[in-house]
Amino acid sequence: MLPFPSANDDDDDDVESTEIDERLAALIASLADRHQKGDSIDIVEECQRYPEFAAELKSLWGTIVVTEAVGAVEASAIRLGKDAGSGAWQLPLPYQFGDFELQTLLGRGGMGIVYQAQQISLDREVAIKMILKDQLASQQDRQRFFAEARATAKLEHPGIVPVYDVGEIDGRPYFVMKLIKGKTLYELIQNGELTPRTAARYMEQICRAVQFAHDHGIVHRDIKPSNILIDESGQARLTDFGLAKISDSVDSLTKTGVVLGTPTYMSPEQASGRMGPIGPASDVYSLGSVLYHAITGQPPFVGKNPVDLVFKILEQDPPPPRVLAPKLDRDLEMIAVRALQKPKDLRYSSADTMGDDLLAYLRDEPISARSGQFAHILARYFRETHHAPVLENWGLLWMWHSLVLILVCVLTEILQWNNVNRWSYPLLWTVGLGAWAGVFWALRRRMGPVTFVERQIAHVWGASMLAIASMFPIEWALDLEPLQLTPLLGVISGMVFLIKAGILSGAFYIQAVCLFATTGFMLAYPLIAHLIFGAVAALSFFIPGLKYYKQSLVNAEPSTR
């Protein structure tokens, strides 16, 4: 019933798999080297160039880029030091810079450095942001820097730090912003200066600012506590649009397969490295991450290393906020949990909707997050894991497999009606299905290298085939009539789909339940038992097979972005 590679092919498979793995490793190493040198890698184009490695590149590239990005930040931190006097690149202060006198270093990030300055002509205090790499900045760095300035300059909102001027002096790009006197949200969290209600008030203000940006076609993509400034009047302001995505921009500075954002607060679709799905819903997730950190004192996910962190974002749910903060109001917990849903359609529909719930909480009014609680719980169990894309390799094969299952079950029923020799059944279910397994596996290997997860699933299937094969000698040993134990087919197959639900997609719980229920119907209607099993098992493979086959066709189309 379940295809699995034969033992005779193990030696050849190992040799060929080793060669394929070496080619894949060489390709990934080459792409990683190009990425480190600053080349822009379009992973969709690479998948089209190397179709035999498409599935592996899609699943691995996001993790590779995140690892390199975080490693680069850590290396930069080592070079730059932790404080202003560590020998990092910065201008000697005070420094005359055109119409500005740079006075104090306010901070720096991965791309920019910010100074407090005095604008001489207008006699006002301002903040000036410059490229951290100074004249060594690449053309792409300069484009992204000016893109941030253009994006922010379009947005006039109380919750967004305004930009006054943009320019370049002595080869140094800069833009001038309003000087916000106060602290970052990150500092308030670290110093323990936030109550849950205060955090909710600040985040409600930021939600309105993010919605304003979305209304103007801008997605921030890097919302985090250090990018939120709290001024002396208590107004929260969003800054650092360096990774902002402008929806109407013709020349995108990022391509498919590039991971952007701060890993701790990024959405699952950002962590996966697929740029296409990133939109306002990704900012909503990041807002939820920041709210979670503000009300619990801990980010939703903490990893030992970047890869561990990415896998947690993709796969795990954060600890319930009330586990970390037992006195936290349940409504505020529900708001954070709603925003942190991995399926985008289960998050708040907009930043404004999340802001409405935060405002309702502050006014002690009912929140909307409670109304969808049951749907959220269901979605948590039925969502796909990050391994699910490998099913695109199996879609068409599963559709063929469903046809083979129907054929085998119909032949079994015909043999039973004609009272043939009992050993005809194991011949059909072991030799017949074993031959199909060989064909199935050969077709799969022609599509490209088999991933580790696929091998795990194959071993589960192999175990189920051994269990099915063992039923026939057990019947003979116990002196039972032929096919007396075949209702166990539903149990065995249900267990296989139960395991697949945990590894690949929670949707397979449905198939598992249906197959377990099939056992009862097979016992109740023994004359057509195998037809019942064949129909249910075939549909269990055909429906997801059709879904993932269509999905593979869509993903194979050339990217239009």
Image (cartoon, rainbow, N blue to C red):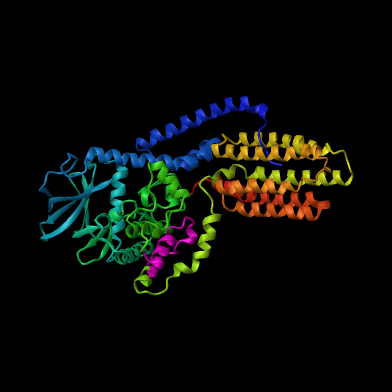
State the quadrant of the N terminus: top right
Q: Position of residue 258 (x, y in %)?
A: 41, 44
Above or below for 150 versus 66: below
Q: Quadrant of residue 42?
A: top left
Is residue 340 visible in the rendered structure shown here? yes
- Residue at 52% x, 30% y is 21
Is residue 561 visible in the rendered structure shown here? no
The range drawn in magenta is 328-357
Q: Position of residue 171 (x, y in %)?
A: 20, 44
Q: Single out the residue that lies furthest toward the front.
A: 478
Q: Single out the residue that lies furthest toward the right.
A: 418
The overriding secondary structure of the stretch rendered in magenta is helix
- For the residue pair 513 and 402, the one nearer the viewer reads as 513
- Residue at 87% x, 38% y is 421
417 within the magenta span: no
Left or right of 481? Residue 467 is: left
Above or below for 342 versus 438: below
Left or right of 204? Residue 435 is: right
Q: Position of residue 558 (x, y in %)?
A: 52, 45
Left or right of 127? Residue 357 is: right
Q: Position of residue 526 (x, y in %)?
A: 81, 52
- For the residue pair 10 and 304, the one nearer the viewer reads as 304
